[in-house]
Amino acid sequence: MTPNNIVNMAIIKGLDAIAITDHNSVENAATCMEVGKENGLLVIPGMELQTREEVHVVCLFPDIEAALAFQEYVYSKLPPLKNNEKLFGEQLVFDKDDEIVGHNDRLLLSSSDMTLRDAFNKVNELKGAFIPAHIDREAYGIINALGFVPDDLPISTLEYKNEEGLKKLVNSGIVPKRYNFIRSSDAHYLQDISERQNEMEVDELNSLNIINKLK
Amino acid sequence: MKVKDLADKLGMKILTGEEGLEKEIEGGYTGDLLSWVMSHASKGDVWITVQIHPNIIAVAVLLEMAAIIVPEDIPVEASTLEKANSEGIAVLQSPDSAFELCAKIKAAM
């Protein structure tokens, strides 16, 4: 997955907008936004945050400045451990010509020492959207970690992976129907980028409008 | 054994009010994935968990657990303690790890 691969695959698939959500990091977002702009694809800067509760949350931001401010906060809450590329793979940073310009040394896969509440407040302050990720997955889904979606935070949108999984959670009453549910591809490989099959309506196509629909 | 007696015996700090301290301990459970704990722990258990989110109180109420013990002196969110007080669930804190706590509690019971 490189910036040009991702953007061009998304265009081939006919998508209007994508979000780049690396784990606990936004280091490739600016480049992907730039490549997207050159090719006519909206790229929203974001992060898949792992909170202290071991819950994954998709955080989307209206602009790169907000995303970088969030990254700074997250980095200050990560344990001071170094990545082991042999064990966990490389954490590469690309430029807009898909050249590798850096290796991120931090161990990004661990949890940030930030509660869901801290994270929600910070994302909200930066005018971003806070979306618990793949709620129907066992690994790092909010239901698995916390049993149910806490009602002490004004969360409005939940992301799911499979229709079947979501149906089970809603039909059993574990997840109330009142939420907005979105399905994204959570693509870790090019071939997993979704077809043009999930949609939402906005007045004008930009990050802020999409984020405001998800808040 | 009562929650209060266990807290005294192991020198644990009581983070909540008086209300939950008289409950009788019938067993124990350790786990941090709340969905798993909800389907495996039992009534009357003292539950050792590193999770400090307010949802732990709901799980303890649901299963009628005796108390929650937070190991390694992890600071507990204020909203969690508020909920614990309103539901009458005692939250205890210990410098010991969950492993050490299990051994000590088992020996004390």
Image: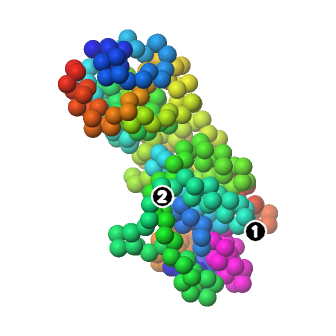
To which chain does the residue with label 2 belong?
Answer: A
Q: Which mark is residue A3?
A: none
Residue drawn at x 47%, y 45% is A53
Residue drawn at x 39%, y 69% is A84
The spot of residue B64 in percent (x, y) is 37, 22
Residue drawn at x 42%, y 23% is B13
Magenta span = A29-44
Crowding at label 1, few (<14), some or many (≥20) Cα neighbours within 10 Å?
few
Tell me if I can see residue A89 in this picture: yes
Task: In the rendered view, tell whether residue A12 sits above or below residue B49.
Answer: below
Amino acid type, mark 1? Leu
Q: Residue furthest left?
A: B107
Task: In the rendered view, tell whether residue B11 sits above or below residue A210.
Answer: above
For residue B49, which quarter of the picture?
A: top left
In-image side of A201 versus A106 (left or right): right
Q: Nearer the viewer, residue A85 or A96?
A: A85
Residue holding disc 2: A80
Q: Main secondary structure of the magenta part?
A: helix
Q: Earlier in the sequence, mark 2 or mark 1?
A: 2
Q: Secondary structure at mark 1?
A: loop
Is-magenta flag for residue A37?
A: yes
Residue holding disc 1: A205
